[in-house]
Structure formats: structure tokens, C-alpha cells
Amino acid sequence: MGGATVIHAAARGARLGAFVVDSAFAHARDVAVPFVMAATGWPRLAVLPFVWSAEHVHGLPLTRGTTLEAARRVPATVHALVIQNAGDPIVTVGQAEALAAALPSAQTWITPAPPPDHPIVGQQGAFGMHCQSYKLDPDGYVTRVAAFLDAALPAPGS
């Protein structure tokens, strides 16, 4: 929820010149089912009524105030880098692309999914590559994020 929180803050006028989000979702409703499946190991058939109940019986507002709606309200002066791993089973590349399209000054960086025999694949289990772009290439990640922030933000003292 970190990336979604930053986007909502930027939309509400937080004083940001730029921000970076990794594995941020466009719609909470779209990630609820795959997240619960990954967290519980339950099959989709069992998760669907569980999520429906959370929304309709218990009032969990999964469709209210979507991150995509907030992204459309972020000022064009705020630059964004949207990072997404192609192997993320929770937040899809399509969600990252939708967020980037809604943000007026965004760049998208889709990191490649690792090969199936990569050690991190077994370590992550059902969560797959959700929020794992940094672990796959720490030096490349830091270089790309630092270059984005250097280009988007004024130098200190200027």
C-alpha cells in the first residue's frame, strides 16, 4: 500500500517534486483476490466469496477512492517513476501502465521476471515477484531510481 499512499498524498497537495512507486496498484479490488490467494493458499473459488463478503457484508470499501482516480489529480509538475516487475502475480503490468497513463508526468519501468529457476522465485512463493525488482538487480535499481530523481528534482541549493 506504500505506492498507493504516496499517489493519494500527491493528489491531495503534498509538496512533492517527484516520487517513485514500485508495485503500486491502480484498483484495490483488482488485487484483493490474488493477494488473499497468495496470503492464504486458498483457491480462487474460495477467495471470491470471501472478498465479496468483505466488501458487501462487512463494508470494506475496495472500490472507493481508487489509486487510479487519485493519479489523475496529481499535478503535472510532480514527476513519477512507476516500477513494476513483469512476474508479479498480485499487481499486473496492466495496472502499472494504467497508473503511469493517468499520472501527467510519469515514466514506466517494467523490470523483467526472473527465470523460473532463479532462487528468489522459490523464496517468494505465491507472492512471486511482488515488490522484488530491487532484489533482482540492486545496483541497476538504485542507478535507475537515482537517475530519475536527479533529472526530476532541482539540485540542492539551486
Image: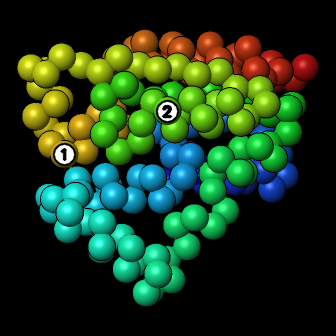
Amino acid type of the residue that numbered disc 1 sits on in the rendered structure: Ala
Q: Is residue 121 left or right of residue 49?
A: left
**If you read the primary sequence from the N terminus, does the residue marked by circle 2 or circle 1 appear first?**
2
Name the residue at 20% across, 68% down.
Answer: 46
Mark 2, residue position = 94
What colouring method underlies this structural image?
Answer: rainbow
Q: Closest to the observer: 10 or 27?
A: 27
Name the residue at 79% across, 31% down.
Answer: 104
Q: Is residue 16 left or right of residue 41?
A: right
Q: Is residue 42 visible?
A: yes
Q: Residues within 10 Å of mark 2 (few under 14, many from 20)?
A: few
Q: Are marks 2 and 1 in contact (CB under 8 Å)?
A: no
Residue 88 lies, with reference to residue 30, above or below; the image says above
Q: Closest to the observer: 144 or 35?
A: 35
Q: Where is residue 47, by image quadrant? A: bottom left
Instruction: Quadrant for the C terminus, please.
Output: top right
x and y, in percent, of residue 90 in the image: 35, 45
x and y, in percent, of residue 153 in the image: 78, 23
Q: Is residue 39 visible?
A: no
Mark 1, residue position = 126
Q: Where is residue 44, by image quadrant? A: bottom left
Q: Residues within 10 Å of mark 1 (few under 14, many from 20)?
A: some
Q: Which mark is residue 138?
A: none
Q: Closest to the observer: 17 or 103?
A: 103
Name the residue at 80% across, 56% down.
Answer: 12
